[in-house]
Amino acid sequence: MARFATVACAALALLAVGACSKKSSDSGDRPAKIAPMPPAEIARAEQACATYVARVCACAETQPELVRQCELAKASPGALQINLELLASDGLEIGEQKAVKVEARKIAAVCFEADGKLDVAMCPRESPTE
């Protein structure tokens, strides 16, 4: 009886592998892609994170209470870049692509919001160069 159970389990495993391999070959080489983030949105997100990091870290030089915030902020551009690279790569399923896109937008939102919360009197904004 134990041998029958082992053979039955092995047969079921082979059927499952066969079904999975057939399913992946039927769906094509690559999963479908969602619409990419517009280049202007990517540029704004990258600029927002870079500006926030520069501003909070410059303030941290004279305000020790911002040192930890500066350290944490430094991870934002890298996290954003990882998400953007994942979005540009092949192999993610539609749901994964959507989740990565949402996360990239969340990171950008955090950069915008955190920069906006910095006290302008203590952490002045740089005036745009013309």
Image: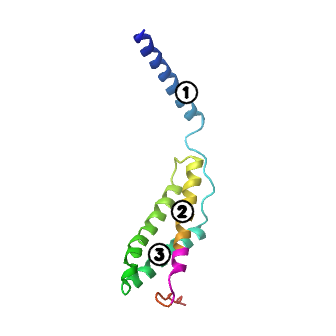
> x%, y% of residue 117?
53, 79
Say what secondary structure mark 3 lies in. Answer: helix
Foreground pick, 82 / 99 = 99
Q: Are marks 3 and 1 in contact (CB under 8 Å)?
A: no
The numbered dot on residue 19 is 1
Inter-mark Cα distance, 3 to 1: 48 Å
- How many badges with numbers are in the image? 3
Prevailing secondary structure of the magenta residues = helix
> Which amino acid, mark 2?
Ala
Q: Could you tell me which quadrant the N terminus lies in?
A: top left
Residue shown at the point (52%, 50%) measured from the top left: 90
Residue at which label 3 appears? 50
Residue at which label 2 appears? 104
**38 within the magenta span:** no
Indicate the quadrant where residue 63 lies.
bottom left
Q: Could you tell me which quadrant the C terminus lies in?
A: bottom right
Foreground pick, 117 / 96 = 117
Hey, which residue is sitting farthest right in the picture?
A: 35
Residue shown at the point (59%, 54%) measured from the top left: 98
Inter-mark Cα distance, 2 to 1: 35 Å
> Which amino acid, mark 3?
Ala
Inter-mark Cα distance, 2 to 3: 14 Å
Residue shown at the point (48%, 18%) measured from the top left: 11
- Mark 2 or mark 1: which is in front? 2
Could you tell which of marks 3 and 1 lies nearer the N-terminus?
A: 1
* Highlighted magenta segment, given as a residue range: 112-120
Residue shown at the point (62%, 53%) measured from the top left: 34
Q: Are marks 2 and 3 in contact (CB under 8 Å)?
A: no
